[in-house]
Amino acid sequence: MEKNVIISVRGTQTVGGNSSGVMELMTEGMFYRKDNSYYLAYNESGQYGFDDANTMIEISDGTLKFIRFGMINAQFIFQQGKKYISHYDTPHGSFTFCVFTNNINIDVDDNGGVINIDYMLELENGPSALNDFYVRISEPGKKPGVQNEHFFKM
């Protein structure tokens, strides 16, 4: 199973109780299943400074791996209640992030679905930021094959 899909992404970040950024992206991509994992691949938008960046999301057993490569290279692992250290390489330098997943909800099947992640992000021992990451995967002209979709809301 490999198919073209429409991908809607929304990310918000809150630092110190104040919303410091919202990122929204709608793009086309590829969605497929291999063994017991789902994969989603798409190109990032230059609108957010990710020119020539490709993104791959691997979904497996309640864990999501977010991999960005190209001009910017990063890998983030999201697993509820777990903390992971990640590196973010840019043309301007490398950064170390600590990611702690507060809540992850994955409702994906062969027809698409939705992903909601609520996580804390700490940049090189600096202040923490609360982040919400939402992804909706659907075939062109169809809603995702899930029962309880909460569009852009945890």
Image (cartoon, rainbow, N blue to C red):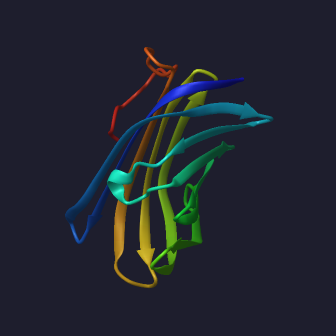
x and y percent of residue 24 in the render? 32, 45
From this view, report whether residue 129 is shown above or below residue 32.
Answer: below
Q: Residue at x 34, y 79 (%)?
A: 127
**Whether residue 62 is visible:** no
* Nearer-the-camera pick, 85 or 91: 91
For the N terminus, give its image quadrant. top right
Q: Residue at x 43, y 58 (%)?
A: 50
Quadrant of residue 37 within the rendered picture: top right
For the C terminus, give its image quadrant. top left
Return the residue found at the far top. 141
Q: How many marks?
A: 0
Q: Is residue 102 left or right of residue 60?
A: left
Q: Residue at x 51, y 20 (%)?
A: 139
**Whether residue 42 is visible:** yes
* Nearer-the-camera pick, 118 or 140: 140
Q: Residue at x 26, y 59 (%)?
A: 21
Return the residue found at the far front. 52
